[in-house]
Image (cartoon, helix red, strand yellow):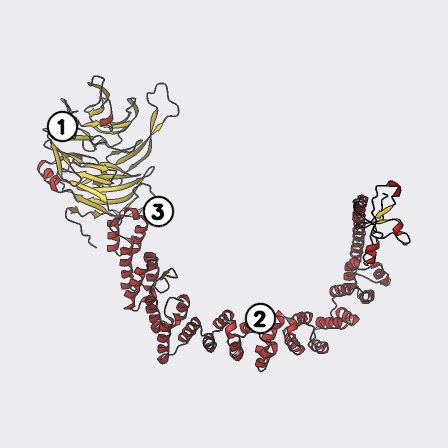
């Protein structure tokens, strides 16, 4: 596919299938990494004309403007679109370097002939000029030159000359480094500055004017520094990037833990990454988040370079290697084969790169989110475009989720990917009912409403117009009747019942369908025509729907159900039987009369009724159920016997003996009172001593234990079981005495040990119980004694309950003995004479239990 680029744009030739970049924050991770496209644009307007006439020699970039030095010595100030705003005629020979401070208020420039100028970009107040008799390679201002009181800057010739202003506004100079040939490059970042000579790189602490580190150039002698100069760039305030030919180093400046006395700096430099590029010689370096942007020439397989084209690459550095994230050829006008005539600058605030050659100025930027979405839409990658819309909504200006989503919907419909239409519409429309209605009306013409039917809003507070729901239902009536009932259930109350019912009935006339009948039944239910709805559900065999209707509207349908009981059972006889058994509105006789010719249905109903209330069935029904349970097995029959008391014992005994149900037979004999016969079946026929022991224990009769013992004595193997179990229920001595001498009993010793153990345990339990009883008795007696010792208050107004005279007399000579009972009744003792026992007269008269509190007090 050929991409079209606007006028003034270059078309890059991609070396890789994809161009990948990390996020603007520079965090390299799988979540942030995304596919983007590089945009190459040649600045036109004044920039292009100036470079064609004068030729470019150096470049400096700032957030506000660009500074372009030319071969004729002029410095042009351009805006970022390439329009010239000002021209400085500072030099007469090619400008070799330009430096700008961070605020963009001052700049410094130098020419090959030794001219150096420092001046303001907007005023001439701080203009300074120097003349050297040797080549000057750079003049770099302190990054905060405008606010720096010392107005510091450095100049590079064959030495590093440091300038700072003194108290009298005169500049003081000092040489920081020399003796290694030309100092060709400098990069100053706040406190630290790096300088590159033909031999080494020197890093300075510019606050203390101290060398932090110096490391030598590591390149083959054939790669002369004039043609392969060092390139320096700061990744951040303490991370330096150094490029030499095809070798790149990443250096970190760190604080020293302990500063040596001989050292003038408290920092040291550590090379954290060093690697050789595979296919490029470095012409320019720039940081890009945590990655590296490189401009250079292509390295050929034989080690030489291809100078006919330039490459622009993004690399992710590692310890001893790098990962190439992208690589693109830049078809510049290669009017010069000298690699030193190409330079790369980065505007980090906007993530844009500027490439200067002799004849053109090219801007490289990554596509913004809107352009990224345009590309994805053009490539039909709508899902990726939607994801970008969600993740980067703050960065998108031109596109909206709704517009992109609608384009995606149209694409799905065109490519007949109908299953994806509904979920996507829900994502983009949400609860916006107007957009949903527009989409429904649009799909109706193509009979594709079913693609969104299960996703449109159907809440009471977020619903579409009734026409929208009716359009979709109409489509289902004619094309998808099998899905119509579920839709009618889901959309209750959102459409006109009469309208939809008329359409269904009209369709049903010439195309009968069970689903259409079900839909009619649902509509009749919603209209309150419950009897008609029930008839329809039973007719088409919808037992679950019929039972739901009966549960909800039983008061309206209880009489109608009795008229159609047999069809109701035919639909789902198990659920129907449970429903009928649950409702006591119908008597057993009413239901059984209608089902008497259908034994299966009748039995199912009787079983459900018996489970709910066994006493609700008459004896005849119990006998019928007994015959049914007899065929299900002995266990089911026994369960029935234990729950029922209305069946015929004689008939039950006959059935059990006929079918060989011995346990059930023993149970029946037990119930009839023939305990010994029941025990005989358990022991002689079942030979189940365990059950026999349980049987004797439940009956608690000594004669049964004797019968069991007599039987087990004849069977030594059964006697072992009996001896090991009876110690907790009867005195085992009787069993032991009944054993005839000389009888061989298996495991007799263990059984006797078990009996003795149980006997000791019972004695211990009885002794402990006696101790607990005695303790509780003493405690309760003490409490009773304390209660009885308490006095009973007799007030001054108290009178004898027999003579009605005052109990308390102020004249002590007339006082008599009195008796006060626990019931608070008080008497004169003489009044109680003649009674056999000292009891309360009133309480005894009321046939109440007389109080045994016989203490009394003399007054």
Would you name the residue on which mark 3 appears?
31
> Looking at the image, is 679 positioned above or below residue 786?
below
**Residue 786 picture location, percent across and down:** 80, 44
Report which quarter residue 50 is drawn in. Answer: top left
Q: Nearer the viewer, residue 62 or 589?
A: 589
> Could you say whether the residue bearing mark 3 is in a helix, strand or loop?
loop
Q: Residue at x 26, y 27 (%)?
A: 193
Front label number (3 vs 2): 2
Q: Residues within 10 Å of mark 2 (few under 14, many from 20)?
A: some
CA gap, disc 3 and disc 1: 49 Å
Would you name the residue on which mark 1 appears?
112
Q: Please say if the residues under marks 3 and 2 sit with CB atoms less than 8 Å apart.
A: no
Residue 773 is marked as none
CA gap, disc 1 and disc 2: 108 Å
**Residue 699 picture location, percent across and down:** 78, 65
Q: Is residue 300 visible?
A: no
Q: Is residue 677 visible?
A: yes
CA gap, disc 3 and disc 2: 60 Å
Q: Nearer the viewer, residue 193 or 305?
A: 193
Q: Earlier in the sequence, mark 3 or mark 2?
A: 3
Left or right? Give the position of 591 relative to 399: right
């Amino acid at each position: 596919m050929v991409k079209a680029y606007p006028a003034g744009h270059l078309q890059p030739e991609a070396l890789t299938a994809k161009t990948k970049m990390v996020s603007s924050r520079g965090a390299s991770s799988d979540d942030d990494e995304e596919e983007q496209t590089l945009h190459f644009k040649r600045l036109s307007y004044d920039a292009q004309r100036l470079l064609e006439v004068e030729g470019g020699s150096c470049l400096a970039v700032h957030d506000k403007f660009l500074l372009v030095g030319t071969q004729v010595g002029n410095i042009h100030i351009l805006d970022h679109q390439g329009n010239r705003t000002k021209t400085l005629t500072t030099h007469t020979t090619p400008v070799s370097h330009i430096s700008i401070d961070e605020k963009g208020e001052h700049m410094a420039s130098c020419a090959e002939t030794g001219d150096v100028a420092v001046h303001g970009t907007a005023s001439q107040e701080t203009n300074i000029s120097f003349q050297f008799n040797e080549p000057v390679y750079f003049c770099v201002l302190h990054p905060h030159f405008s606010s720096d009181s010392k107005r510091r800057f450095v100049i590079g010739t064959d030495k590093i000359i440091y300038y700072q202003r003194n108290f009298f506004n005169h500049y003081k100079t000092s040489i920081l480094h020399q003796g290694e040939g030309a100092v060709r490059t400098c990069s100053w970042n706040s406190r630290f500055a790096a300088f590159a000579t033909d031999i080494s790189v020197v890093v300075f602490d510019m606050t203390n004017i101290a060398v932090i580190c110096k490391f030598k150039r590591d390149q083959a002698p054939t790669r002369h520094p004039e043609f392969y100069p060092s390139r320096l760039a700061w990744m951040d305030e303490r991370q330096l990037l150094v490029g030499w030919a095809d070798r790149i180093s990443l250096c970190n400046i760190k604080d020293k833990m302990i500063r040596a006395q001989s050292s003038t700096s408290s920092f040291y430099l550590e090379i954290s990454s060093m690697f050789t590029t595979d296919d490029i010689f470095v012409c320019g370096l720039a940081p890009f988040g945590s990655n590296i942007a490189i401009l250079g020439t292509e390295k050929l397989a034989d080690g030489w370079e291809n100078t006919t084209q330039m490459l622009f690459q993004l690399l992710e550095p590692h310890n001893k290697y790098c990962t190439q994230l992208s690589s693109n050829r830049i078809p510049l006008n290669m009017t010069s084969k000298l690699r030193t005539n190409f330079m790369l600058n980065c505007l980090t605030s906007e993530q844009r790169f500027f490439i200067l050659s002799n004849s053109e100025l090219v801007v490289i930027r990554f596509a913004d989110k809107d352009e990224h979405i345009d590309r994805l839409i053009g490539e039909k990658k709508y899902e990726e475009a939607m994801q970008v819309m969600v993740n980067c909504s703050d960065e998108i200006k031109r596109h909206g989720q709704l517009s992109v989503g609608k384009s995606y919907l149209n694409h799905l419909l065109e490519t007949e990917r109908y299953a994806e239409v509904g979920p996507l519409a829900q994502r983009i429309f949400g609860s916006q009912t107007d957009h949903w209605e527009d989409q429904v009306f649009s799909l109706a013409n193509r009979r594709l409403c079913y693609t969104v039917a299960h996703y449109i809003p159907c809440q009471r507070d977020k619903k579409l117009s009734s026409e929208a729901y009716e359009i979709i239902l109409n489509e289902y009536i004619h094309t998808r009747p099998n899905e119509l009932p579920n839709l009618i259930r889901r959309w209750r109350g959102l459409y006109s019942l009469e309208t939809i019912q008329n359409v269904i009935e009209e369709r049903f006339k010439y195309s009968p369908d069970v689903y259409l009948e079900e839909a009619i039944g649902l509509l009749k239910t919603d209209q309150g025509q419950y009897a008609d709805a029930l008839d329809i559900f039973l007719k088409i065999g919808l037992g679950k729907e019929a039972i739901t209707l009966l549960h909800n509207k039983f008061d309206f349908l209880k009489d109608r159900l009795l008229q159609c009981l047999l069809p109701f059972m035919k639909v789902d006889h198990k659920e129907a039987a449970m429903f009928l058994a649950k409702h006591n509105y119908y008597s057993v006789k009413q239901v059984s009369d209608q089902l008497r010719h259908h034994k299966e249905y009748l039995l199912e109903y009787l079983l459900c009724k018996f489970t709910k209330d066994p006493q609700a069935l008459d004896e005849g029904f119990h006998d019928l159920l007994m015959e049914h349970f007899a065929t299900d097995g002995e266990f089911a029959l026994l369960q029935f016997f234990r729950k029922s008391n209305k069946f015929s014992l004689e008939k039950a005994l006959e059935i059990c003996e006929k079918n060989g149900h011995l346990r059930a037979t023993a149970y029946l004999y037990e119930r009839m009172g023939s305990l010994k016969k029941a025990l005989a079946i358990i022991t002689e026929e079942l030979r189940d001593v365990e059950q026999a022991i349980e049987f004797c224990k439940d009956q608690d009769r000594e004669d049964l234990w004797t019968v069991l013992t007599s039987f087990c004595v004849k069977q030594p193997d059964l006697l072992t079981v009996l001896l090991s179990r009876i110690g907790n229920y009867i005195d085992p001595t009787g069993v032991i005495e009944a054993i005839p001498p000389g009888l061989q009993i298996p495991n007799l010793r263990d059984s006797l040990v078990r009996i003795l153990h149980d006997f000791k345990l019972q004695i211990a339990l009885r002794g402990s119980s006696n101790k607990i009883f005695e303790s509780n008795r003493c405690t309760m007696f003490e409490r009773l004694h304390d209660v009885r010792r308490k006095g009973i208050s007799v007030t001054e107004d108290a009178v004898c309950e027999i003579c009605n005279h005052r109990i308390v007399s102020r004249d002590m000579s007339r006082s008599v003995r009195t008796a006060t009972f626990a019931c608070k009744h008080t008497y004169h003792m003489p009044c109680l004479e003649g009674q056999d026992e000292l009891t309360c007269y009133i309480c005894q008269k009321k046939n109440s239990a007389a109080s045994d509190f016989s203490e009394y007090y003399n007054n």
